[in-house]
Amino acid sequence: MADISLSTATPVIPRRRFLWSTLVDHAVLITGALIMFFPLLVMLQTASTPDIETMKYGPGLYFGDQLDDNFRKAMFEASGFSGANTGLSMFKNSLILGLGFAIGKIVIGMMAAYAIVYFRLRFATFAFWLIFTTLLLPLEVRILPSYEITQKLGLLNTYTGLIVPLIASATATFFFRQFFRSVPEELVEAARIDGAGPVKFFIDILVPLSQTMIAAMFIIMFVYGWNQYLWPTMITTDEGMYTLVRGIKRIVQVLQGGNEIPEYGRANVLAIIAVLPPVAIVIFFQSWFVKGLTESDK
Amino acid sequence: MKRAGFASRWLPILLLVPQLSIILVFFYWPAAYAVKSSFYLQDPFGFGQTFVGLENYSSLADSAEYLRVTNFTVVFTVLVTFFSLALALLLAVKADKVIRGAKSYRTLLMWVYAVAPPVAGYMGLILFNQRWGPLTELFGMFGWEFNLRADYFDTAFAMVVVSVWKQVPVNFIFFLSGLQSIPKSVREAALIDNRSASGRFWDVTFPLLAPTGFFLLIINITYALFDTFGVIDTLVKGEPANNPMTLVYKVYIDGFRGNDLGGSSAQSVVLMLLVLALTVFQFRMVEKRIHYT
Amino acid sequence: MAQVTLDSVRKIYPNGVEAVTPASFQIKDGEFVVLVGPSGCGKSTLLRMIAGLEDITEGALSIGDNVVNTLDPADRDIAMVFQNYALYPHMTVRKNIAYGLKNRKTPKDVIAQKVDEAAKMLNLTEYLDRKPAQLSGGQRQRVAMGRAIVRDPALFLFDEPLSNLDAKLRNQMRIEIKALQRRLGVTSIYVTHDQVEAMTMADRIIVLNGGRIEQIGTPSDIYHNPASTFVASFMGAPPMNLVAAEMQDGILSFAGLELPLASSMRGPVTLGLRPEDLIIDSHGPLAMEVELIEELGAHRLLHGQVNGQRLTVHLAKEEQVALGPLHLSCRVQNLCLFHPETGARMDGGFAFNLAQDRMEERV
């Protein structure tokens, strides 16, 4: 302790400079965080205010008391013509799309990656290229032919048609391949000496070992599936099949036309509901998610 | 493959069947279909199609509108990529530096990752509302009469802003994790060798981040080309009219709305070639990086 | 328990590289054999072929009386300890040890009993419910051992099991493993690149170099009677001094040293001298210029030059030395002669033409 008092004279200047730069750092970060948050705040405000006020004055500074009312309308009253696309039914469809996509992708990807990494396969290289070429072309560039084919197969307005074509890429397979390759060589050798066959090794050792990776992949894929827009827009014409994100298109069209007061409150509640589940997952499982995302870099 | 792989014959095939069959039906078939359609002209009334060779491609090359869309796409991609990378890098460097509240900042700056592009576009519609949008009012104070969907430049501006807002978090996450993976000893060595903080950043940190940056460059270009579809579609409310649009959006408009399957397929093929070139370029660079480090 | 026989076992990788040239040897029941050599010498490949983790290109491998070339690793009645332990990170110590038994459909109560026994033997009882990540390096090493011993295998295989431990722990585990093997009497094959481990643990050592067996013998045999310059320089720290000498008219000469040999060889030879066989002797024939003294507490090492060739001398701690010129003599009976090009041993034991009474003499 004594030597601290001895050295008080010198560090005065560096210390002050340090403080200033820290202040700037925080200021930049806080500004960034506020810009990120601002649009959501506006949405919340308009969702809690009577539509007529929003229409006249735009987003205000104070929160109103209409949030529960708008929430009820958004969730349980249909906005379309058939009466099928309530917020609740869209929520359910989004959930099915997100879960179905994430689970399907992970299961199929893990199986394929396991086959490629852990087996002596004569056509392994060929299978590898066949699968990994799909990383090159996003769905968007082959959207029309994909639509035509899905239509030919009679899969319009079905969950299969919604989910399966989206799974036709190798992101998860690639990811798990990378991970499996990083698993120490000796583990499978030890397991073989311990008498475990391929199925046993996969179930007893590889899957439990991949837990974190599966969780990370699940989060990324769920968000990706939930947020799909173009494909659901094309493939679902039946309002009962709409997802929340696809429903945005309908909301926009409703706000567009008509002479009545646009239902800003209800629309914004729907938009918030469309955003909330994936955001919550990403925030709560942040460390897994970040790990999964950045791991794919390698 | 592992040194001591399993020798079973049928099991790996069984494991590969689901993946292979899905990509054959929903990837290779559509891709081949697109290539084939690009050589045909679709009858407008749905009565079959005629082989026209490269006509769809040559009419693309001659089309003034296609050129305009291509130009916009290039400008849009450059702007979105540059600004989302630069802003994310700034935020990541700051977040990596602060000790207090580092985790909270990370959360506050990354959650937008999970917002769907069309929802981001919808938020843009509210913020840039012609009459009372908060940002429209803000610009008004500086004498800029912002006119979403009526003015080409203003609409393009909104598209870039929303797309950047949506993309900064992804880049931020990658940059931050890249910064955090720089070994402490390297930072400490730099601290001893270089007095100036900005000097240390440009001489040591930035080069070490370069691989991450390059990877993100490709990711961002792909994002600006393809994933911004939702943003654009909502901002123009599905009616592009004279508003700016990207190449992917034009594929969709021509094919789905305009029923010009041949033309749209030709555009798809052009895009496929573009992405292919981009990927080959990426692989080349990655290989280089492996060789030289 | 079993003996292991390799009959011209050979490994050629698909890319054409011959990792192991045909190797033949027999390991007796209960014997502890160490395969030693620098990295890339084929020792691990050989071990992995015995384990069944690598295909055997040619030759026959038998464990006990059965040729096991095509048997699955699980069916060879072996247990293996890996360099990085290869513990299953998501399983507790207990489950790690029990996994092999469980897969062999061993009854639950037998598993429990065997795991407890092994844990007691290895001082792991209190750690049985921990995961590998919560253990120290030495404890993980013991778990890997436990996993091997519960199975009562016919053969233990060790693949550099101590190289991930720090020096102190390595010495301790070396003794533990050796003691355990003695107690269980299981035939063991142990791969290492560390010659000290090889010397201290082995009943017999097999020295490998470039996929070829250089020498098979007891530690003492290998040390005192190396079959080649490779073995001479690989085994022993500091290694044997190898200097260029000359044979002429039945006289071996190196620097001031002249030694009559009953041999018609003539021309250059490589002379091998162990550092501990060189003795400070003011009347000695070798004039050495000492350049560096390494103080090791229990003894000292002198480094210097004789006639322009590097030489290391092992010195007891009592002896006083200083940098500068010094005279040495050497113990004759431990000299080795090697072919100057092939490095093969030439003298074939002690073929020096010296009267028996002069053998003890210093020259």
Image (cartoon, rainbow, N blue to C red):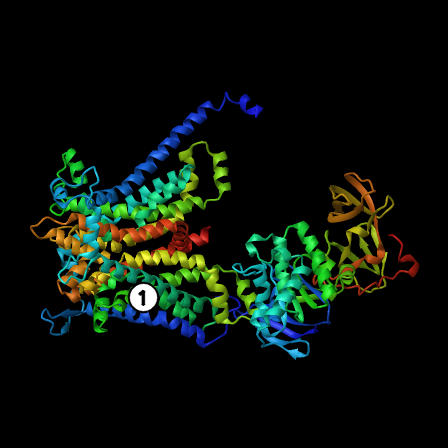
Residue C297 is at least partly visible in this image: yes
Question: Which residue shows up at 33% across the image and 58% down it?
Answer: A222
Q: Which residue is mark 1?
A: A168
Indicate whether B188 appears above or below C172.
Answer: above
Q: Residue at x 67, y 60 (%)?
A: C120
Residue B13 position (above or below residue B75)? below
User: Residue B149, position in %: x, y?
Assistant: 13, 48
Residue B242, image x, y percentages: 11, 51
Q: Quadrant of residue B130?
A: top left
Horizontal and vertical percent position of residue A178: 43, 60
Location of the C terminus of chain A (image quadrant): bottom left
Residue at 11 percent of width and 46 percent of height: B150
Res. B73 in view = no
Q: Amino acid at mark 1?
A: Ala
Dot 1 lies on which element?
Answer: loop
Is A119 drawn above or below residue C333 in the view shown? below
Reply above or below: A196 against C352. below
